[in-house]
């Protein structure tokens, strides 16, 4: 499955810790991320991550385009509710809702989705998108 990782500045370390904890599960899938988040996760975990531009430079829109083409199966966007200057979580959420893509904005929901992924509960995405297999 294709997984997108994004995180506001104040949540990047949490994303790194999350990915360290679940590196074994994530390693079985293709991962893309905005630049700063992806570099931090790749350095900490050794996971291969496709890097897009930083969120502020258009990375959110690049990932949004992949979502719009239904090429992403799961999105983890750790958002900082104190960061009111960034509306990209809302745009990503709308696209995920439009295409029935599981979307987590916090570590609690992300853990549920990752455990579901581990248990095979998201395999219905492979039926929807048979070309998106790793």
Image (cartoon, helix red, strand yellow):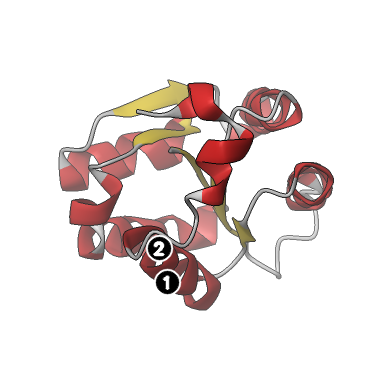
Closer to the camera in the image, 57 or 6: 6
Residue 3 visible within the image? yes
Kindly indicate whether the residue at mark 2 contacts the one at mark 1 (C-beta within 8 angstroms).
Answer: yes
The residue that appears at 80% across and 51% down in the rendered structure is 97
Q: Residue 111 carries which label?
A: 1
User: CA–CA distance between discs 1 and 2?
Assistant: 5 Å
Check residue 22 in the rendering and tell me which mark sits there, or answer none: none
Q: Position of residue 70 (x, y in %)?
A: 68, 30
Circle 2 packing at 10 Å, graded few (<14), some (14-19), many (20+), is some
Tag 2, which secondary structure? helix
| Residue at (47% x, 73% y) in the render | 112
Q: Is residue 73 visible?
A: no
Whether residue 126 sits left or right of residue 29 in the image: it is right
Q: In this view, does 67 lie to the left or right of 75?
A: right
Residue at x 42%, y 71% (from the top left corner): 111
> In which quadrant of the rendered view does residue 43 lie?
top left
Q: Position of residue 108 (x, y in %)?
A: 49, 78
Q: Which residue lies furthest to the bottom in this view?
A: 108
Horizontal and vertical percent position of residue 99: 77, 42
Q: Name the residue located 25 percent from the left edge and 29 percent from the top edge.
A: 48
Q: Mark 2 points at which residue?
A: 114
């Amino acid at each position: 499955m294709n997984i997108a990782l994004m995180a506001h500045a104040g949540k990047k370390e949490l994303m790194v810790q999350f990915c360290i904890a679940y590196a074994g599960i994530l390693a079985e899938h293709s991962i893309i991320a905005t630049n700063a988040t992806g570099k931090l996760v790749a350095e900490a975990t050794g996971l291969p991550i496709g890097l897009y531009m930083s969120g502020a430079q258009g990375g959110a829109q690049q990932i949004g385009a992949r979502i719009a083409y239904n090429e992403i199966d799961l999105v983890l966007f750790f958002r900082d509710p104190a960061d009111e200057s960034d509306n990209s979580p809302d745009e990503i959420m709308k696209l995920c809702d439009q295409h029935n893509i599981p979307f987590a904005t916090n570590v609690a929901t992300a853990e549920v989705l990752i455990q579901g992924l581990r248990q095979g509960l998201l395999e219905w995405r492979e039926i929807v998108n048979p070309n998106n297999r790793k």
